[in-house]
Amino acid sequence: MLKRVHFGPSVLPFLLVGPQILITLIFFIWPASQALYQSVLIEDAFGLSSEFVWFDNFIELFEDVGYWESVGRTFFFSSLVAALSMSAALILAAMADRIIKVVLAYQTLLIWPYAVAPVVAGALWMFLFDPTLGIVAYTLDMFGYDWNHKLNGNEAMTLVVFAASWKMVSYNFLFFVAGMQSIPKSLIEAAAIDGAGPLRRFTSIIFPLLSPTTFFLLVMNVVYAFFDTFGIVHAVTKGGPARATEILVYKVYNDGFIGLDLGGSAAQSVILMMIVIALTVVQFRYVEKKVAY
Amino acid sequence: MVENRPYVTFMAHAVLIFGVIIVALPIWVTFVAATHDELRMTQIPLPLLPGGHFFENLNEVLFEGVGSRGSPVGMMLLNSLIMALLIAVGKISISLLSAFAIVYFRFPFRMGFFWLIFITLMLPVEVRILPTFAVVADLGLLDSYMGLSLPLIASATATFLFRQVFLGVPDELLEAARIDGAGPMRFFWDILLPITRTNIAALFVILFIYGWNQYLWPLLITTDQSMYTVVMAIKQLLEAAEETPQWHLIMMTTLLAMAPPIAVVVGMQKLFVKGLTETEK
């Protein structure tokens, strides 16, 4: 951690870490402790009085059917996003791995969505699927399917999943390609000499050896789907119709800023923080055990 | 390639081209919509090939904005640029300094500071919005560039990255610098910074995109139209579209909102990939 050759104690190092520590304390530690504190209070809507209620906010939250529905929805949403974007990226990466010569050209064309903000991604997909004008909705209509994500909850969920997965394909693609290129060519060649075709080599050699990358990406995709998709939901569906797309991070915002239920929203924040901490720990344990070949 | 199988290679190209089409379709449709006039954008089916109104729309959006109450997008682009640069430069500067202190100095509470920074990794802004908003409001930073950027500036990821880079720097460099009489800051400025140049550039690319794409935070703390960023404006345009669908202008704004980060990613692809793979490990 510390360099063998280093500088001795003085005021300088304190000045150097100062800015970061100050910002961390003011904008991270203090607000987070406030969230913890508020989660055990009940405040009236005008903020005039508050009462200490122990874990009542949490109990209320756990007894709320709506909260559990949102939890279930979030897990459903995250698994769909992770499955869709990872499998699409894996297929594309496996194909790109065959034609190394032009992989860079395809890569250039596939990384764009990473740069697009979630809310903008939402706007793009919303425009494609707009019930009255959208090109995809129009095409579906020609086939006799009446698309309207503003009324149909399942269709709203589908649309949000598409937009969220689309954005993540670039990221997954880059990591899968890097993972595949670090697999020794001798293994692939040996399998080919033994008579294994491309599909067999993929299922028996490439995919198993990719498992560290796959696991890492699974964690990253879940984190993304849990926290970074707020913009998509907010722009495209506002959690609706009838809460069909109200995932946890949207509910925190909605209950706190719109519903003004400060205690309840803070309790939800605390639970989300615990989820992040758990995911971070999982990710770090992965880093330690990273398989090298 | 291990063996020559033309059919499989052909299929690989076909699948990749299909993937590229799916990935590019939303962006293409947006671009096309931005090149037509209002009338054409209300006729079903919508066009799939560009029209001739691109510069007209660009001009209207940049200097007048969308709708009667809209503010000029040119100004929002400037706000977004300032915010993104402040976040990227701010994060890199404070992380470089703190990583330097933690790796190169022995001082009390060194590990305590390190863990304090580590904790921020676990607290994304989305889960602590209400209290952070309260802090920024108390400090009088609403509707200001400082309020937009400061709360997003502390970053454990960047500090970790630089810590890792510094740990890989040979000890001999510091010994040599000392023999030549260089103090800590001289060593930092003349030796450490130049050798971490590519790492800094790679991280800058990632952080610029991160800053530019901020949505929830600007949405909460800006009420003054002159402080709006272009990404947060998209939402209001979509809402306005329910009443008066000016899709040609909305899609032009959307195009402008994603053009700068896309240009950065495609133009600095090598640095981008380096930054992405380094920050996540």
Image (cartoon, rainbow, N blue to C red):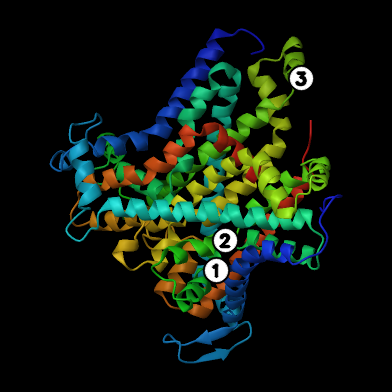
Residue under numbered circle 2: B124
Give me the residue at 50% from left, 50% from top: B210
Position of residue B224 in the picture relative to residue A54 (left or right) = left
Tell me if residue B206 comes above or below residue A9 in the rendering: above
Q: Is residue A34 left or right of residue B261?
A: right
* Same chain shared by disc 3 and disc 1: no
Is B185 on the left-hand or right-hand side of A3? left
Mark 3, secondary structure of its residue: helix
Residue B96 locus on image (x, y percent): 65, 52
Q: Nearer the viewer, mark 3 or mark 1?
A: 1
Residue furthest front as drawn: B181
Question: Circle 2: is it few (<14), some (14-19), or many (20+) Cα within 10 Å?
Answer: some
The three-letter code of the residue at mark 2 reads Pro
Secondary structure type for disc 1: helix
Q: Which residue was labeled with disc 1?
A: B128
Q: Nearer the viewer, residue A235 or B216?
A: B216
What's under tag 3, amino acid-wise?
Answer: Leu
Where residue A77 appears, as percent x and y from the top left, is 51, 52
Q: Nearer the viewer, residue B261 or A248?
A: B261
Separation of disc 3 and disc 1 at Cα?
48 Å
Q: Residue at x 47, y 46 (%)?
A: A164
Q: Which residue is mark 3?
A: A187
* Chain at tag 2: B
Q: Secondary structure at mark 2?
A: loop
Quadrant of the rendering where the C terminus of chain A is positioned: top right
To which chain does the residue with label 1 belong? B
Q: How far apart are the two marked residues, 3 and 2, measured between alpha carbons?
A: 41 Å
For the residues labelled 1 and 2, say whether their Cβ atoms are less than 8 Å apart: yes
Residue A169 location, x and y as percent?
51, 38
